């Protein structure tokens, strides 16, 4: 293979993985920004989305769009259930909320293990073939992931920026108490934000299912990535999550291709430490008011 | 020599200047009142002096040492202590434990001492009991702090600050939210603290009657700028001060 | 007035509990119980380490990472011929030094960031163990770690190792109790309850938290090493994220306030994995459910039920005294 092709492949892979991380990190950062809960179970919703898609599309041959809709919808419902039963009790209580989310992660991951077994499943590609531009080929299977993720991020942005519920969510993220005084129904915003975040994670899982294999244990790694990204990008910042996600995706892809995968992890950790030292509010985060 | 010298102090948040070019001094034994309409920058000034916020420009000198921008915990060990606006206490600890925690930094044990003996605890509790006595909280010593009334919690907050044995005590709106009876009680406690311990004090306060009754000098802030200083009598008759207050709200006098 | 009343009762109870623990090898029906008790001792040390960190108001999701570091350090040094009794302490020291460096950087941040970075650190520790296979044996780990020997007496079998583990655990328990009573322990509790107020009482809360993180992680390093010499084996799988979570679960279920909480948590939850060994998934689900339910209904842990009862008695006494005083 020529250097050029390797380079393009690396960039495409980096963007693909990066966009998945962006989806994960946005959901994670949204739940934190609005509910003040660090959700260690975030990746388990990614796992659930991927698994449901693998079963619906891979094993039962349902049409693609219906499978996506059902997988994301069912995971969103699961998220709503978890919000109602567990997370709402801990909103605002950062420490206990975080510990409770670990419990939820344990329950979800091992329920999947009991239900579906530990062996990895593969999902047939949604689309095959390549896109050839000026002699450089892009595999469609990966472009679909990038395009799908971009569509999700753009629609989320429209939702947050241009709808009433989006405005309400931003208000709650800024100060839940003041938002409540202004007549925003905070008790509605919390589950909405949580379900949105969970849906993004599930959608990321759906997108990645045909590219990687699916097992009950795939949730932890993207959770860790979401953490790393929000620390780099700034906790609660959506643009920060996008920038951080793409940065981490590209670092991972380049270091993985040219050096080694574990070196890339260590490099990412050092980036986190450097950001924490030099710019603790994150690259694009707002500085918290000191008073 | 003045105990505290604030020189050309400035603090801004982003583009917003909360305190601009403020200079004043506090002499040993003073009870200085810091007043001004809402949003005048009193609390910001307070936070900068006590080391909670860094100044954007200017210096704060305490006992001839530059303390500007130094972390709050060191400033306290040098003898400058403060209270907070809300009732700032340890709600789950007992009242005496609350005050005992306030004495820890001034103790002789340091971080590693007192590991095997209980002697330090007895010394600390004795100190704490003296402070509680001064604040009329002795009978509450064994209760959890959250079980106290709001007025008592506010008093406890001041007691914790005093427990670190400061030479200068800064009080952030000590009577805000208290009913007249509780406010009067706190004022008499402050008078007693002043008399018995000889502590120099600064008080940010909205409640004019408390300021006029306690302070020997008053500094007035408006829009982040120092607009007047003098004795309480001078201040109430100062046209600039009246103007600043009448522009926004009436003086509580 | 705040010091615990020195009634003889608790001391009798403590002595009885220690006696039962010490005599266990003699009346345990089989070796498996001794094994379980040894694991319990190691877990207790790890949970106490976590409790010390929590005492200062922080939460470490990377606790297993420090145990892993300790385990590898002690295994590697002892395999080079160093005496294991010495390498145990070196392991604790190395873990403590790493924690001090990491803590100094990340503890200036708000709690959430600290948790995330500590968690990331433990993942890096696992990755490094996997990656540096020429030193660490990669995924296969290190087999044949030498046993601990004390003055020539080799702790090879379970009944021989257990007393040593028990002594280590009880010493840690005693030191933790002494720490909690000391001025430093008081500062830690104050920092956890109201950091801003503690700071304005002249205490460098950042330093207090770094010290707590260093001590707690050092204990984790020691305990990880102890376990490695007991099992004579360590691999990257020995301390994963889920191990960190199980220590956290024990702490939360038992209670975060005193030294009793970790003991209760360890006693309740150490046997669970062994009882449910056949269905590993179910065991984790139960852990997760216990964790969530405890946070919802007994957020201060099982040990707090005793304290609530005690303080209710105290309040009753105090108000009775006040009423008596008021009545002319």
Image (cartoon, coloured by chain):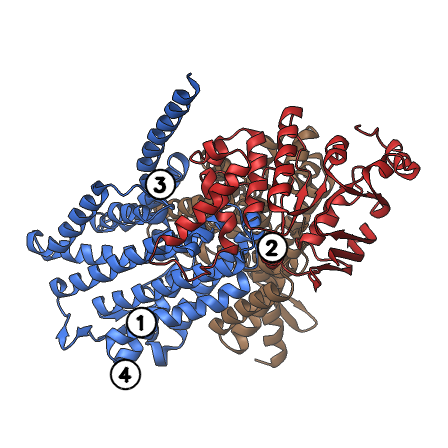
Chain colours: A brown, B red, C blue
Chain containing the residue with disc 1: C
Q: Which residue lies furthest to the right in this view?
A: B239
Where is residue C2? Give x, y as percent: 38, 42
Vertical placement of residue A290 versus C67, above or below:
above
Q: Nearer the viewer, mark 3 or mark 1?
A: 1
Is the same chain shared between marks 1 and 4?
yes
The answer, for residue C250, to whether it is visible in the render is yes
Residue at 63% x, 57% y: name it. B75
Which residue is label 3 attached to?
A: C301
Where is residue A15? Give x, y as percent: 61, 63
Element carrying mark 3: loop
Cα distance, mark 4 to mark 2? Answer: 51 Å
Q: Residue C80 carries which label?
A: 4
Which residue is label 1 attached to?
A: C89
Left or right: C309, with A11 as reference point:
left
Element carrying mark 4: loop
Vertical placement of residue C245 versus B182, above or below:
below
Circles 1, 4 touching at the beta carbon (< 8 Å): no
Where is residue C67? Give x, y as percent: 35, 64
Which residue is label 2 attached to?
A: B76
Mark 4 closeness class: few <14, some 14–19, many ≥20 residues within 10 Å: few
């Amino acid at each position: 293979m020529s250097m050029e092709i390797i380079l393009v492949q690396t960039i495409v892979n980096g963007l693909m993985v990066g966009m998945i991380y962006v989806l994960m990190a946005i959901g994670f950062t949204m739940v934190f920004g609005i509910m003040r809960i660090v959700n260690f179970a975030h990746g388990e919703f990614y796992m659930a989305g991927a698994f449901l898609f693998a079963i619906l599309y891979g094993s039962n041959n349902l049409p693609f769009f219906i499978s996506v809709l059902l997988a994301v919808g069912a995971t969103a419902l699961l998220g709503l259930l978890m919000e109602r039963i567990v997370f709402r009790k801990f909103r605002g209580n950062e420490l206990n909320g975080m510990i409770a989310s670990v419990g939820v992660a344990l329950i979800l991951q091992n329920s999947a293990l009991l239900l579906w077994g530990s062996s990895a499943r593969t999902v047939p590609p949604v689309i095959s073939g390549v896109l050839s531009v000026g002699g450089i080929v892009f595999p469609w299977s990966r472009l679909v992931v990038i395009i799908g993720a971009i569509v999700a991020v753009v629609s989320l942005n429209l939702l947050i920026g241009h709808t009433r519920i989006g405005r309400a969510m931003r208000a709650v993220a800024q100060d839940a108490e003041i938002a409540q005084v202004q007549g925003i129904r905070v008790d509605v915003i919390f589950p909405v934000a949580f379900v949105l975040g969970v849906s993004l994670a599930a959608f990321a899982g759906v997108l990645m299912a045909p590219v990687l294999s699916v097992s009950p244990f795939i949730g932890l790694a993207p959770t860790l990535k979401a953490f790393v990204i929000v620390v780099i990008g700034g906790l609660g910042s959506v643009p920060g999550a996008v920038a951080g996600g793409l940065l981490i995706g590209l670092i991972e892809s380049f270091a993985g291709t040219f050096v080694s995968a574990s070196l890339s992890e260590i490099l990412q950790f050092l980036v986190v430490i450097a950001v924490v030292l030099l710019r603790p509010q994150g690259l694009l985060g707002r500085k918290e008011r000191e008073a | 020599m003045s105990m505290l010298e604030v020189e050309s102090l400035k603090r801004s948040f982003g583009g917003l200047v909360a305190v601009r070019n403020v200079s004043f001094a506090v002499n040993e034994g003073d009870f200085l009142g810091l007043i001004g309409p809402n949003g005048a920058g009193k609390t910001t000034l307070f936070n900068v002096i006590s080391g909670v916020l860094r100044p954007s420009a200017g210096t704060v000198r305490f006992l001839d040492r530059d303390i500007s921008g130094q972390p709050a915990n060191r400033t306290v060990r040098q003898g400058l202590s403060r209270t907070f606006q809300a009732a700032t206490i340890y709600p789950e600890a007992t009242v005496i434990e609350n005050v005992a925690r306030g004495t820890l930094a001034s103790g002789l044990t340091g971080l590693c001492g007192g590991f095997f003996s209980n002697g330090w605890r007895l010394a600390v509790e004795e100190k704490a009991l003296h402070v509680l006595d001064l604040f009329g909280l002795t009978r509450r010593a064994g209760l959890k702090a959250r079980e106290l009334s709001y007025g008592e919690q506010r008093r406890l907050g001041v007691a914790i600050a005093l427990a670190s044995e400061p030479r200068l005590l800064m009080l952030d709106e000590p009577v805000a939210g208290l009913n007249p009876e509780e406010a009067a009680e706190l004022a008499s406690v402050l008078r007693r603290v002043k008399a018995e311990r000889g502590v120099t004090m600064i008080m940010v306060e909205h409640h004019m009657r408390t300021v006029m009754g306690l302070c020997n000098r008053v500094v007035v802030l408006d829009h982040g700028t120092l607009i007047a200083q003098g004795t309480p009598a001078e201040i109430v008759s100062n046209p600039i001060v009246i103007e600043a207050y009448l522009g926004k709200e009436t003086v509580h006098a | 007035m705040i010091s615990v009343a020195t009634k003889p009762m608790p001391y009798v109870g403590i002595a009885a509990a220690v006696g039962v623990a010490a005599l266990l090898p003699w009346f345990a029906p089989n070796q498996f119980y001794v094994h379980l008790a040894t694991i319990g001792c190691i877990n207790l040390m790890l949970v106490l380490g976590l409790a010390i960190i929590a005492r200062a108001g922080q939460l470490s999701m990377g606790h297993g990472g420090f145990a892993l570091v300790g385990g590898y350090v002690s295994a590697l040094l002892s395999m080079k011929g160093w005496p294991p009794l010495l390498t145990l302490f070196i392991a604790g020291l190395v873990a403590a030094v790493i924690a001090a460096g990491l803590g100094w950087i990340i503890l200036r941040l708000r709690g959430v960031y600290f948790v995330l970075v500590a968690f990331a650190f433990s993942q890096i520790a696992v990755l490094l163990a996997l990656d540096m296979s020429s030193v660490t044996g990669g995924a296969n780990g290190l087999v044949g770690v030498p046993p601990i020997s004390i003055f020539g007496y080799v702790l090879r079998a379970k009944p021989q190792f257990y007393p040593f583990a028990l002594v280590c655990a009880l010493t840690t328990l005693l030191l933790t109790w002494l720490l909690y009573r000391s001025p430093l322990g008081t500062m830690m509790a104050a920092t956890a309850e109201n950091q801003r107020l503690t700071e304005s009482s002249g205490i460098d809360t950042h330093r207090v938290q770094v010290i707590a993180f260093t001590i707690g992680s050092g204990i984790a390093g020691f305990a990880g090493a102890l376990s490695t010499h007991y099992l004579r084996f360590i691999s990257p799988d020995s301390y994963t994220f889920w191990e960190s979570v199980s220590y956290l679960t024990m702490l939360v279920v038992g209670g975060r306030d005193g030294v009793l909480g970790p003991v209760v948590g360890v006693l309740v939850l150490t046997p669970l994995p062994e009882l449910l060994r056949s269905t590993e998934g179910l065991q984790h689900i139960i852990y997760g459910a216990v964790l969530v339910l405890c946070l919802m209904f007994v957020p201060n842990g099982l040990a707090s039920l005793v304290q609530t009862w005690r303080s209710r008695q105290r309040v009753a006494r105090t108000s009775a005294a006040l009423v008596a005083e008021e009545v002319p």
